[in-house]
Amino acid sequence: MKQSGGQQGGRRSRPTRREAKPSEGRSPSANDQRARRPGRLAGRVALVTGAGQGIGRAIALAFASEGADVGIVEIDPAKAKSTADAVFELGRRCVAIVGDVGMRADCERAVEETARELGGLDVLVNGAAWAQPNTAVHETSDELYQRTFDVCMTSVFWTTRAAYPHLKKSGNASVINFASNAGTEGMAGNAVYAASKEAIRGFSRSLAREWGRDGIRVNMIRPIAASPSLAGWIEENPKLAAVQARAIPLGRFGDCDADIAPVAVFLASDESRYLTAVTLPADGGGGQER
Ligand SMILES: NC(=O)c1ccc[n+]([C@@H]2O[C@H](COP(=O)([O-])OP(=O)(O)OC[C@H]3O[C@@H](n4cnc5c(N)ncnc54)[C@H](O)[C@@H]3O)[C@@H](O)[C@H]2O)c1
């Protein structure tokens, strides 16, 4: 479920690039110690879109904890900075690009800057998404339709197309895209978002077939998680949220850090080396499609 509001459309920001700051000179924090542990993604470079909050941020930090250097793209500059700072705290390098994934140039720039600054690209996570909630189809303008599709689906086309030469060079690459129960089950008031999420699945399965021989796996996560956007909806609709949480077999909404990010680490790592074209439902059993 996607319930974010916020300004969208035609908003473009200049990229900010941050160099990694050495963490010497401080007494070792828990983060420093975690960063020193040999990680499952050691030596890899990942790019995570929409990494300013929620699932994207959780994945960026989990990847950094597992030894990856991380590029992030985020439309909100303050959120981009916050995530980049947290990656630096974990002792990893980070390139933070303030950009709009609904714009082709920003997607391409994010891929190129990440690969150039961090020395390649092994993992691409397309986490950014946006939808205007509670909008019936008959009230949806062409502009809103296009904007929703561009941010949610066309961005995935733009980033993956730009990333291909880098991922191919990696020879051991993983692309992770996001599906939604809104798509698999339908969601009144969110039809365009739902359609974009199922489009991502067809696109991803096809990519998996095209790119398998290049050593690039393409998988999807279909999460349910109390990210800030869902948390806002829970706050506004406490009774309905409680009913929905009870309907989830595990009895609660997922946690971005503890429940979703580890699934992305698994899909990015060699532990899932024989998995491609799958949708993992990280949803506590809540989705009907299994
Ligand atoms: N949270 C859930 O329960 C749930 C359910 C199904 C699918 N998903 C999918 O998981 C992914 C992450 O979801 P979430 O709930 O953490 O999202 P979220 O809305 O909490 O965070 C999305 C992030 O992307 C950024 N963003 C939005 N538009 C952008 C743009 N045009 N360019 C760059 N950045 C942009 C936002 O600023 C935000 O930081 C999304 O693809 C979403 O569709 C989430």
Image (cartoon, rainbow, N blue to C red):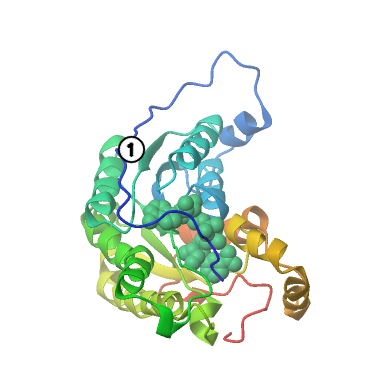
Q: Residue furthest top?
A: 25
Measured as percent of width and height from the top left, residue 202 is found at 35, 80
Give the residue displayed 43% in from the left and 83% down from the top. 137
Above or below, comparing residue 179 to residue 108 in the picture: below
Q: In terms of depth relative to the viewer, which is nearer, 289 or 196? A: 196
Measured as percent of width and height from the top left, residue 76 is found at 44, 45
Position of residue 260 in the picture relative to residue 109 (left or right): right
Residue at image mark 1:
118
Q: In terms of depth relative to the viewer, which is nearer, 10 or 206? A: 10
Please state which amino acid type lies under the numbered disc 1: Leu
- Mark 1 CB near ligand 1 (8 Å cut): no
The answer to whether residue 266 is seen in the rendering is no
Mark 1: few/some/many CA within 10 Å (<14, 14-19, 20+): some
Q: Quadrant of residue 263?
A: bottom right
Give the residue displayed 45% in from the left and 81% down from the top. 191
Position of residue 93 in the picture relative to residue 114 (left or right): right
What is the count of numbered marks?
A: 1
**Quadrant for the N terminus in the image:** bottom right
Q: Quadrant of residue 44?
A: top left
Measured as percent of width and height from the top left, residue 93 is found at 43, 33
Q: Residue furthest front?
A: 139
Q: Quadrant of residue 98?
A: top left
Position of residue 284 in the picture relative to residue 266 (left or right): right
**Quadrant for the C terminus in the image:** bottom right
Could you say whether the residue bearing mark 1 is in a helix, strand or loop? helix
Give the residue displayed 47% in from the left and 49% down from the top. 51
The answer to whether residue 236 is seen in the rendering is yes
Give the residue displayed 34% in from the left and 47% down from the top. 99
